[in-house]
Image: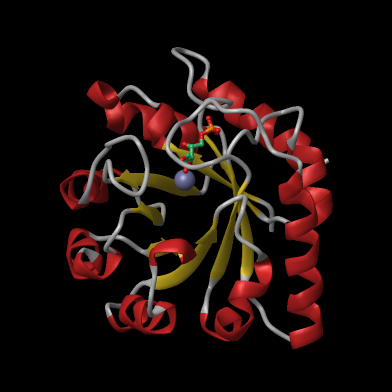
Amino acid sequence: MIELAFSILASDFAHLADEVAAAERGGGTIVHVDVMDGHFVPNITFGPPMVQSLRPVTKLPLDCHLMVENPDAFIPAFAEAGADMVSVQQEVCRHLHRTLQLIEQNGMKPGVVINPATPVDTLIEVLPMVHYVLVMSVNPGFGGQKFLPLALEKIAYLAALRKEMGLGFRIEVDGGVAHDTVGAVVEAGADMLVAGSAIFSPGKTEQNAREFLKVARA
Ligand code: DX5
Ligand code: ZN
């Protein structure tokens, strides 16, 4: 199933519940929450209190993408706040296997993220324990950046590995995914599509989500 994980980074935080509801009416099925700490990435966003505020306003799964230096320190707080899925950046995890175990032990679905410069091969040993792999198609930190085509080969390689290894993890893609790039991304094998700036726009969010999914599922 091809799903839209809409990134609330591009939404109007002053009207967050309405923004989420509009994207959901348009067919979005996952709320993508971009957590940035100002260290791993040159930007600051929000943390567990935001997840806690979101939890009662939607039944959709909350997918927290942790762009932080020390994810282990925050994993229990995200679980407590009501997160369903948590992904961590391969680049900051000295003990990636342990961190993924910690996410699982806290009752959430573990995911691992790789930046544009990080090879898929760094993940082979942990693929059996993840629910999803997130391939960054921009350098993380900001919404509205241009899609990097190098992500396509990485997605296709992951899809091939999944088959070869007999696994069931999902493939998520994040950054610059919009109406003009989503076709290639789906063709390469991604099935969880993160999109922010392509979806959120005052008065047009529902329609944007619907049109995005129409192209993605064509
Ligand atoms: C970037 C974030 C993305 C971002 C995507 O660091 O991880 O989730 O919100 O935004 P768009 O869809 O605008 O590229
Ligand atoms: Zn993200």
Q: Between 62 and 118, which is closer to the camera in this rendering? A: 118
**x, y percent for residue 171:** 64, 61
Which image quarter holds the N terminus?
Answer: bottom right
**Residue 66 against residue 121 in the figure, above or below:** above
Q: Is residue 162 visible?
A: yes
User: Is 217 left, or right, of 99 in this rendering?
Assistant: right
**Residue 135 against residue 106 in the figure, above or below:** above
Q: Is residue 189 visible?
A: no
Q: Residue at x 73, y 38 (%)?
A: 182
How many marks are shown on the rendered structure? 0
User: Is 200 left, or right, of 209 in this rendering?
Assistant: left
**x, y percent for residue 26:** 55, 32
Q: Residue lying at the far top in this picture: please name it.
A: 203
Q: Between 81 and 97, which is closer to the camera in this rendering? A: 97
**Residue 174 against residue 142 in the figure, above or below:** below
Q: Residue at x 33, y 27 (%)?
A: 18
**x, y percent for residue 164:** 81, 84
Report which quarter residue 22 is drawn in. top left
**x, y percent for residue 20:** 38, 35
Q: Residue at x 18, y 51 (%)?
A: 52
Report which quarter residue 110 is drawn in. bottom left
Which image quarter holds the C terminus?
Answer: top right
User: Is 153 left, or right, of 19 in this rendering?
Assistant: right
